[in-house]
Amino acid sequence: MRAKRNIVIPIGDIAGVGPEIVVKALSHPEVYEWCNPVVAGERTALERALQVTGLPLTLREIQDARAQEYCCGQVAFYDLKNVNAAEIAFGRIQAGAGRAAYEFIEKAVDLMKEGQADAIATTTINKEALKAAEIPYIGHTEIIGALLDTPDPMTMFQVRNLKVFFLTRHLSLKDAIAAVTREKVYQYIKRCCQGMKNLGYENPRLAIAGLNPHSGEHGLFGWEEVEEIMPAVKQAQEEGIMISGPIGADSVFHLALAGSFDAVISLYHDQGHIATKMVDFERTISVTIGMPYIRTSVDHGTAFDIAGTNKVSELSMYEAIRLAAEYADVYTGKTC
């Protein structure tokens, strides 16, 4: 039987639902069958989350995650003592919450560097709260990438067995189309291939989505497939990469979900986001690849409108922990 991995979970922005979904996820006994969950947080925030949720869990402060017994019913956590939940209101942007959220992530990364944790599963933070705290990063990927000296990690979405990479993400649709160039597509295909190898796939079967309706129909509905995507695919194939496409976006994600491909390269933000979230919104997990350690994350926000009400579902956090535990066994951490 394999040794269970330590998965560190920073609790996020405590003005949002982060602490709630952490304690709710850790109330499931099977989580402790997958891994040893280690929380990077603060006592008053976790106590407030237990009060909101009414869960009969106890908090157990620890100093060394390697020298612990883990069992459902006890939340093993590091207490950073860096914020007082009584001073942080639910549902509001607050610098104190943004600063604490950054410090929880920083502690989680330190634990991985020290060998006390093998992977990280992140909850929710707020970009405006980070800005209010004068944190010079906009999100988890940028923070963790900087702390681990990885300037350009890759993002992959996973829901069930559907895995999706993104050639572009936070660009306008006009700029995203302009970014579909032969060289960019070719280089990204190579990165995706290495990213999948990092996850344990020896010879990953990749597919790339088309940009235009019906992948352009040989120029009838646009020339990007003919002039940019197909030459990049051919070049990658000549180097031994198993890549198919471009395949129409109305079918390629279904084919991958059915098992024809191991991963799909989406060309812009909504193309891949819609495909994954329509399969199962709450089980769509963000996976960051190319850093020394695997990172998984919920793919929803701080939900300020329902924070402190016990209305939030923990399913995304639950799934993020499960995937982190699964990939921690095989992840190689090579730059891609």
Image (cartoon, rainbow, N blue to C red):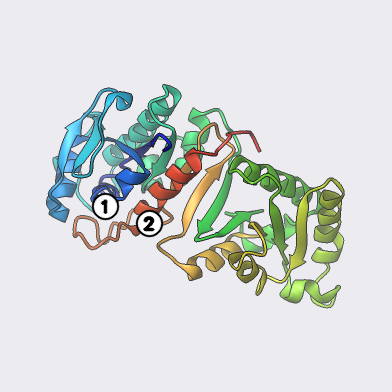
Vertical order, 335 against 256 (above or below): above
Q: Which residue is drawn at 31% across and 50% down?
A: 30
Q: What residue type is labelled 1?
A: His
Q: Mark 1 points at which residue?
A: 28
Q: Where is residue 155 in the image (x, y as percent from the top left)?
A: 56, 48
Q: In this view, does 207 lie to the left or right of 331?
A: right
Q: Which mark is residue 146?
A: none
Q: Where is residue 250 in the image (x, y as percent from the top left)?
A: 65, 74
- Report the front residue among 98 and 306: 306
Q: Position of residue 72 (x, y in %)?
A: 22, 44
Q: Which amino acid does label 2 sit on?
A: Ser
Q: How far apart are marks 2 and 1 (CA)?
A: 13 Å
- Whether residue 87 can be seen here: no
Q: Is residue 281 left or right of residue 315?
A: right
- Report the front residue among 169 and 128: 169
Q: Residue 316 carries which label?
A: 2
Vertical order, 257 against 181 (above or below): below
Q: What element carries label 1?
A: loop
Vertical order, 242 against 79 (above or below): below
Q: Which residue is drawn at 82% across and 47% down?
A: 240
Image quadrant in which you'd find residue 222 = bottom right
Quarter in which the C terminus is drawn: top right
Q: Where is residue 62 in the image (x, y as percent from the top left)?
A: 23, 27
Vertical order, 274 against 132 (above or below): below
- Whether residue 145 can be seen here: yes
